[in-house]
Image (spheres, grey):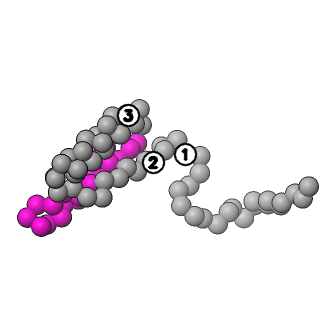
Amino acid sequence: MFRVYWTEHHNDTPQARFRDFDTREMQAALHFIEALRQGQRHGLALQHITMSSQNPHSVGLAGVAEPAADYEWKKRRA
């Protein structure tokens, strides 16, 4: 899944916004980001336009974690 985030300003009050896109819609998400950035360049009160992704099929846990107790990794020297 992709999520596009941006901030709009209405009467000097920032309002956080986001829009979700399916994993198969990366191109649509990029086009949406570009449309927001064009609006920003043309004077719309938009800031912090960014995209984040999350892979629902990830094989590991997100973030930093300690390895399992039975994990034994050793560096092999050449």
Q: Quadrant of the N terminus?
A: top left
Distance from the alpha carbon under mark 1 to that under mark 2: 8 Å
Q: Quadrant of the C terminus?
A: bottom right
Which range is magenta?
1-21
Is residue 17 among what the camera can see?
no
Occupied quadrant, residue 17: bottom left
Q: Amino acid at mark 2?
A: Gln
Cα gap from disc 3 to disc 1, whole angstroms: 21 Å
> What residue lies at 38% left-to-right and 44% top-to-bottom?
2
Judging depth in this view, the residue of 32 and 62 nearest the camera is: 32
Of the residues shown, which amino acid type is indicated by label 1? Ser
On residue 58, the disc is 1
Tell me: 4 left or right of 60: left
Residue drawn at (12%, 67%), measured in percent from left and top? 12
Badge 2: how crowded within 10 Å, few (<14), some, or many (20+)? few
Tell me where residue 15 appears, x and y as whole percent.
18, 61
Question: Nearest the camera: 44 or 8?
Answer: 44
How far from the left and from the top, in percent, is residue 52? 40, 50
From the viewer's perspective, is 61 left or right of 27?
Answer: right
Say whether residue 49 is left or right of residue 75. Answer: left
Q: Main secondary structure of the magenta part?
A: strand
Pointer 3: what residue? 27
**Picture disc at residue 54:** 2
Check if mark 1's residue and mark 2's residue have beta carbons within 8 Å.
yes
In x, y percent, where is residue 31?
Answer: 31, 37
Element under label 3?
helix
Name the one closer to the observer, 60 or 5. Answer: 5
